[in-house]
Amino acid sequence: MARAGITVERLVAAAAELADETGFPSVTLSALARRFGVKDASLYSHVRGLEDLRTRLALYAGGELIDRIAPAVAGRAGRDALAAFAGAYRAYALEHPGRYAATQIRIDQSLIADSPAMRRTAEITYGMLRAYDLDEPDLTDAVRLLRSTFHGYCALESAGGFGAGRDVQASWDKAVDALHLALEHWPRETERKNTGHD
Amino acid sequence: MARAGITVERLVAAAAELADETGFPSVTLSALARRFGVKDASLYSHVRGLEDLRTRLALYAGGELIDRIAPAVAGRAGRDALAAFAGAYRAYALEHPGRYAATQIRIDQSLIADSPAMRRTAEITYGMLRAYDLDEPDLTDAVRLLRSTFHGYCALESAGGFGAGRDVQASWDKAVDALHLALEHWPRETERKNTGHD
DNA sequence: ACCCACAACCTAGAGGCCCTAGGATAATCA
DNA sequence: TGATTATCCTAGGGCCTCTAGGTTGTGGGT
């Protein structure tokens, strides 16, 4: 009997496609097995279970996302960098709704910590904020604000949370402008407190 | 055989409790039936199915949320109103993670449109922004920014997305400050375009 | 007070999912 | 080539949704 030639990598890649096609919640071991012409029990040789697969997918998508953002931001600073970051972020979220949804799931904090993608994301984000000349804890606060707004906007948009009356791209551009403005005139902390790289 | 006395209202209320206790994804018809000491098939007399229950829960939670926000905002304007809105929003999201998660699910747009909770939310949100003297389409853009940031922050926070290094409440206060600043110095549209109440 | 109709609940069962245990076989390597 | 290992299998348990159709408690009409 010919073998399907499954590897963890192929499994995760197929899961990513499946997520974008049918939505993250329906990336299931059964569906994946079906796609490989294999019984679902067979997948347990490659993956510990559904949760394992999903976290792998999350890290995979997180890597893809930052691989899109990094070149967009490269060589830019200030407002340009912010706009590039935002644009790449949202583009990925819209093009790959399933993968993007995967990045939102709760993951063991330790797994996140030593994921190269996450380190790279932190580097690039904090690097982008250098132009605004913020000190801790304002830096961390600013990062949290950016992440929140970007994520919130994409989540709401791809969930159909915005009405159709106003162009969604235009609102996004405005939001980025507003964030740039907020970063430039940031309400600074007078005294320095502890840091805590997000 | 004594009857359990189930109604749609009791069902949704129990689902809300269950959501907060064990997480939104595990609010299931079986679990709910178990809680009422009833077979799961019996619930189909009150609810069309799982999706029906979940959307009811979403609308219910949305109503609770705005019922928290409304009194907090009442009688305030400008920064005060914004801070009150933000505080009530986040407090609800943190106290009732399951219910809050329910509000995030994708719902038939028509169901949302004629939900009184959503109308009330729109009223209060746009009312709160009156102090900033924005015209359309900036108004809608501002609403989208606020919703995005609030939702994104709460989603990330309750998903454990923020490191422990910096106080989460302090970052939130800073974000609200930054939003207030952005609203005050909003990059206005020169020409008027179409409106589209979100 | 009684009967009827309806709503509330039941059992039975199909189908999908996750996951475990243990068996068969293809690929690989000594 | 023969042994080992990784890949895939069948079998089965548990939990889930949902449908079809049967029974029984309850309230309204007479």
Image (cartoon, coloured by chain):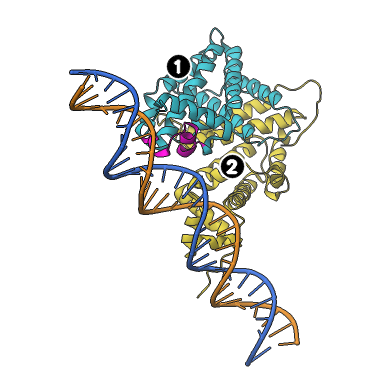
Chain colours: A cyan, B yellow, C blue, D orange
Image coordinates of residue A167 in percent, x first then y, are: 73, 27
Q: Is residue A95 visible?
A: yes
Q: Which residue is mark 2?
A: B105
Q: Chain of mark 1?
A: A
Left or right: residue A29 versus residue A148 is left
Q: What span is colored magenta in the figure?
A: A27-44
Q: Residue at x 42, y 28 (%)?
A: A4
Structural distance between the alpha carbons of marks 1 and 2: 32 Å
Mark closer to the observer (1, 2): 2
| Mark 2 neighbour density, 10 Å: few (under 14) some (14–19) many (20 or more) | some
SS at mark 1 in the image: helix
Tell me, yes or no, whether the highlighted magenta stretch contains residue A28. Answer: yes
Image coordinates of residue A136 in percent, x first then y, are: 45, 21
Disc 2 marks which amino acid?
A: Ile
Predominant secondary structure, magenta span:
helix
Q: Which residue is mark 1?
A: A123
Left or right: residue A47 versus residue B135 is left
Left or right: residue A93 versus residue A64 is right
Q: Residue at x 50, y 36 (%)?
A: A27
Q: Chain of mark 2?
A: B
In the image, residue B55 sits, relative to residue B157, either above or below, namely below
